[in-house]
Image (cartoon, rainbow, N blue to C red):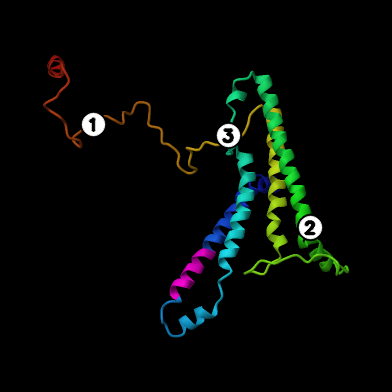
Amino acid sequence: MFNRILNHLEELLVTFLMGAATIIIFISVMHRYLSGYDIPGLQDWLLSLNVGWAQELCIIMFVWMAKFGAAYGVRTGIHVGVDVLINRLDDRMRGKFIVFGLLAGATFTGIVAMLGAHFVWENGAHYAVFNALGIAGEELYEGPITPDLEWPTWIVYCAIPFGSSLMCFRFLQVTWGFVKTGELPHHDHGHVDGLEEEMAHVEANPYNMDDNLHMHDLKHKPLGADDKKGGQQ
């Protein structure tokens, strides 16, 4: 169960964030639209509701979607790469360059994750954790808050260490899989899930119109059609 969730963690998070952002935007638009109608009772109630935070929340959601979507791209091989020269090498050298590239990606994202975690910790997470544990931390930096939601910004910035850490893990996962099997994840851009091409039967001819449901051109018959028909009679 845990492995199944881990293998599809990015899809679960991005799907949840995308669905929630869609609902929030829809509610915000409908609130703004219906508030303009002079309907007794309803207009006063709608104007009493504050949904000015919706845009800011959706922006934060899209930032988190982008970070976890990048990790999904590593796992599925959807990222664009210039491999013209690498593909011209022999299999042994090609494998070495691929492993080097994957480990370089893991190193880079790992460094970004550590720097992001340090930034989040110093930007208010340190203060929040110490206060939650009841430890005196008056000298610690509380950190700024967002304009509309008034959330601590370190919560928003957690997308950097979390997303980069997951991306680093996916790079290492793909590297291990390539060393074991020699294959990289490949994403078919032309494939749409749920739409499978129906293969016609071998003996079936989809272009055959020899029935009374299609129009026939009697003026342009194939040469020898009448002779062949007469010979069969």
Q: Which is more foreground, mark 1 or mark 3?
A: 3
Q: Which residue is mark 2?
A: 121
Q: Nearer the viewer, residue 194 or 229?
A: 194
Percent coordinates x, y for residue 114 in the rendering: 77, 48
**Which element is circle 1 on?**
loop
Q: Nearer the viewer, residue 210 or 52?
A: 52
Q: Amino acid at mark 2?
A: Trp
What residue is shown at x 74% (from left), y 48% (from top)? 113
Q: CA distance from mark 2 to mark 1?
A: 72 Å
Q: CA distance from mark 1 to mark 3?
A: 40 Å
Q: Which residue is mark 1?
A: 209
Percent coordinates x, y for residue 94 in the rendering: 66, 23
Q: In the rendered structure, does residue 30 fall within the stretch colored magenta?
A: yes
Q: Which is more foreground, mark 2 or mark 3?
A: 2
Q: What span is colored magenta in the figure? A: 24-34
**Which element is circle 2 on?**
helix
Percent coordinates x, y for residue 59 in the rendering: 58, 59
Q: Amino acid at mark 3?
A: His
Percent coordinates x, y for residue 13 in the rendering: 62, 53
The residue most toward the bottom is: 40
Mark 1 is surrounded, within 10 Å at the Cα level, by few (under 14), some (14 to 19) or many (20 or more) other residues, namely: few
**Which element is circle 3 on?**
loop
